[in-house]
Amino acid sequence: MIAQRWLTVAGQSVTVLFCGLVLDRHIPYALCFSLIALSAWLNVLIGLASTGQRLARDVEATAQIAFDILQLSGMLYLTGGVYNPFSLLLIAPVTLAAATLPARYALGLGVLAVIATIVLAFVYMPLPTPIGVPPPRPEASLLAGIVAARILGIVVTGLYAWQAATESARMELALNVTETVLAREQRLSALGALAAAAAHELGTPLATISVVAREMARGAPDEQTREDAELLIGQAARCREILQRLTEMPEAQDAVHERMSLTQLVHEIIEPHMIHGVRVEAVVNGPSGESAPDVWRRAEVIHALTSIVENAVDFARSEVIVVARFDPRSILIEVRDDGPGFSPEVLAKLGEPYVTSRPGAEGSRTGHIGMGLGFFIAKTLLERTGAAVDFRNGRRGGAVVAARWPRPAMEAPGFIGV
């Protein structure tokens, strides 16, 4: 805000000098430069009082913008009031306030600018004219049109800036939530990969410990040594069982486990939602005689599609079907339900943040409370993997959400073991 005020000081100074010296207008230099100096002194005082890069609090920022409105109004009073073309600049501080301050402060500053505009329509010094030329006497109709235009500009521009700032803040929050969800899924995926790697690396030393312990048990010189060796054998076997379970967990990923068949993918997506009293079924279709391809296990794809299935379960009457289709060029996954489908107003904005018609937790099968971020997060995650996401209503009713990838973006190439 300080930098902007310095620009205002420079701009007002140049304008006053240009109009007075170049255009030969009758300018009240002393009063104009007094007001300009007042803005400059305010910047100096703020700079001395502030330490570092501290941001002004809302009340401080409101007071500074109110000063800017009053200072500009004073300059306009000295130079023709609303008839001065630069009276349009009263829109600028209101726009800044609407974009950066809470609504109540921005509204107050907007009212101040409107009042200043009305006052300047009746109370002002004559518009500067060439020396020796009398100032024009404007008609009442022209005056009313100018005032109305200025007030309309302040209101419309302020509302537009406030709406844009609000949507930007909501979008930023939604994107932060998306990044948090994706980071969580990636951390879980990395943890599973670490578990698989640990299981693989620990297998050999555990086998060595078991062999040595058996040899110790067979050649034990006394009963205590034999019991200790058998304890080592038992504990090593237990460690192998634990590591075996880790390698069998879906989250455990290494060069082999981070791939899965398309059939496994759709079943993993529907598995958490087969307990809510709705029939959830997965179908995989492709060219005749061709088996379903292997795809990469991606945390963002699984999370996004699981979220979409969860939404379908909440709205379905009796069934949800997840259909996976593949051909030589693409892989398509559709989630269909037999519910009421998307309403026109929701369908027009679906995929944007904070758009929802999901019931509260008490009316939801899954217990999920709709905040309007689920579809936005799912769409964002899927698009980051190269998918084209489509929302529509089915011909026979119900909602349809489809994600289509180019086949190379999803398919895991053939694995050759060593």
Image (spheres, rainbow, N blue to C red):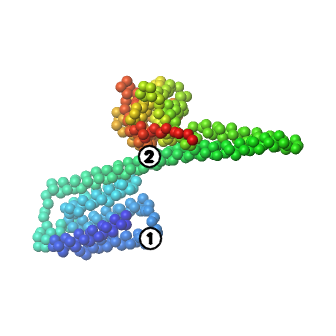
For mark 2, what is the residue? Answer: 174
Residue extending farthest front:
418
Q: Position of residue 334 (x, y in %)?
A: 42, 31
Q: Within 10 Å of the Cα at label 1, are there few (<14), some (14-19), or many (20+) other Cα atoms? A: few
Residue positioned 47% across, 25% down in the render: 319
Question: Mark 1 or mark 2, which has the lower sequence index?
Answer: 1
Residue positioned 44% across, 31% down in the render: 324
Screen quadrant of the C terminus: top right
418 to the left or right of 388: right
Q: How many marks?
A: 2
| Residue 145, quarter of the rendered image | bottom left
Q: Position of residue 129 (x, y in %)?
A: 15, 69
Q: Position of residue 119 (x, y in %)?
A: 25, 60
| Residue 338, quarter of the rendered image | top left
Screen quadrant of the N terminus: bottom left
For mark 1, what is the residue? Answer: 49
Mark 1 or 2, which is nearer the eye?
A: 2
Residue positioned 50% across, 25% down in the render: 279
Amino acid type, callout 1: Ala
275 to the left or right of 379: right
Q: Quick check: can you spot residue 253?
A: no
Amino acid type, callout 2: Ala
Residue extending farthest right:
222
Q: Within 10 Å of the Cα at label 2, are there few (<14), some (14-19), or many (20+) other Cα atoms? A: many
